[in-house]
Image (tube, rainbow, N blue to C red):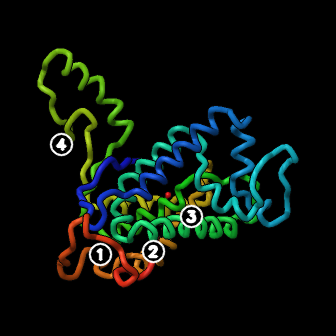
């Protein structure tokens, strides 16, 4: 999977994406606290806060020693727990790259509501697609799926820079050797060291990512990945983005260029917005 590391879309309405930074920080903080074992066994803690369809429907119960919120609240709490360092880092890179521009396009409060709506509604989508499952569902992927779709709808022509981790790892020794010996550091297949970054439009990058989610969900064998929750986030993002974006911003990068105030003067008012939001 190609992981995004930056985009070239500037912020136009806000100076700092405080909500997006806060969401990234909160997810990372929860991961560190859970795995520090301050609150006990990480697996038991995750199980208590995870979304488990049969528990939510009252057809199964967690053991008495498992601590967690009431089952309906796990639709929310499950969004902030992750199973591994790769799980949380890859999710947070997607959120960091795409979320700031979506927050800019929606306004901070609307973006927060959009993010939570995507995550919670995708959770509902998942539990009805697998009502007999007792596998804990955790991770921000469903909410981030909605964020990715919102970015695609708002900035389809934006250039995304991403890395394919296996290729980067394979080529790192070559780059390090060139660095040590002073030899020319050459591009490989047009990809420049040290990270060997791919470049593609948001339409191609996110479009291909959405296609992968749909194919995996249709195959039915999710393994350790709840592909249907990703699909739920995609569907919700498609529905909510036109409602939550600022009225002055066209979808699909179309329409006339709109003059905007500098960040210092870009104070949101109800009249500027229509609705809102991994």
Disc with the residue nearer the chain's start (2 vs 4): 4
Q: Measure how far apart labels 2 and 4 are at the Cα level.
A: 39 Å
Foreground residue among 29 and 7? 29
Foreground tag (2 vs 1): 2
Q: In this view, does 122 lie above or below 41?
A: below
Q: Position of residue 132 (x, y in %)?
A: 77, 62
Apparent side of residue 38 relative to residue 7 in the rendered image (left or right)? right
Foreground tag (2 vs 4): 2
Q: In this orientation, does residue 231 appear?
A: no
Q: Quadrant of residue 184?
A: top left
The answer to whether the residue labelled 4 contacts the one labelled 3, judged by CB atoms less than 8 Å apart, is no
Q: Measure how far apart labels 4 and 1 are at the Cα level.
A: 29 Å
Residue sitting farthest toward the top = 181
The answer to whether the residue labelled 2 contacts the one labelled 1, judged by CB atoms less than 8 Å apart, is no
Disc with the residue nearer the chain's start (4 vs 3): 3
Q: Residue 106 carries which label?
A: none
Apparent side of residue 150 relative to residue 185 in the rendered image (left or right)? right
Circle 4 residue: 190
Disc with the residue nearer the chain's start (3 vs 2): 3
Disc with the residue nearer the chain's start (4 vs 1): 4
Foreground tag (4 vs 3): 3
Circle 1 residue: 252
Q: Which residue is drawn at 58% across and 44% down?
A: 30
Element marked by disc 1? helix
Q: Residue 119 carries which label?
A: 3
Q: Which mark is residue 276?
A: 2
């Amino acid at each position: 999977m190609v992981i995004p590391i930056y985009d070239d879309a500037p912020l136009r309405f806000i100076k700092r994406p405080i909500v997006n930074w806060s969401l990234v920080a909160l997810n990372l903080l929860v991961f560190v606290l859970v795995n520090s074992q301050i609150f006990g066994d990480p697996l038991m803690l995750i199980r208590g806060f995870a979304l488990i369809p049969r528990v939510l429907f009252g057809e199964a119960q967690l053991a008495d020693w498992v601590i967690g919120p009431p089952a309906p609240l796990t639709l929310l709490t499950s969004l902030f727990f992750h199973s591994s360092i790769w799980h949380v880092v890859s999710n947070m890179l997607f959120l960091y790259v795409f979320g700031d521009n979506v927050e800019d396009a929606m306004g901070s409060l609307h973006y927060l509501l959009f993010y939570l709506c995507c995550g919670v509604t995708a959770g509902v989508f998942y539990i009805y697609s697998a009502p007999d499952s007792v596998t804990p569902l955790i991770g921000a992927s469903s909410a981030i799926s909605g964020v990715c779709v919102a970015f695609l709808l708002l900035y389809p022509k934006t250039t995304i820079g991403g890395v394919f981790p296996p290729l980067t790892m394979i080529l790192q020794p070559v780059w390090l050797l060139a660095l040590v010996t002073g030899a020319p550091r050459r591009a490989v297949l047009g990809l420049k060291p040290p990270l060997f970054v791919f470049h593609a439009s948001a339409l191609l990058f996110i479009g291909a990512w959405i296609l992968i989610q749909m194919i995996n969900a249709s195959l039915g064998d999710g393994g350790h990945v709840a592909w249907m929750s990703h699909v739920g986030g995609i569907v919700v993002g498609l529905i909510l983005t036109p409602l939550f974006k600022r009225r002055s911003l066209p979808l699909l990068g179309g329409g006339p260029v709109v003059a905007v105030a500098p960040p210092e003067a870009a104070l949101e008012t109800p009249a500027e917005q229509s609705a809102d939001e991994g």
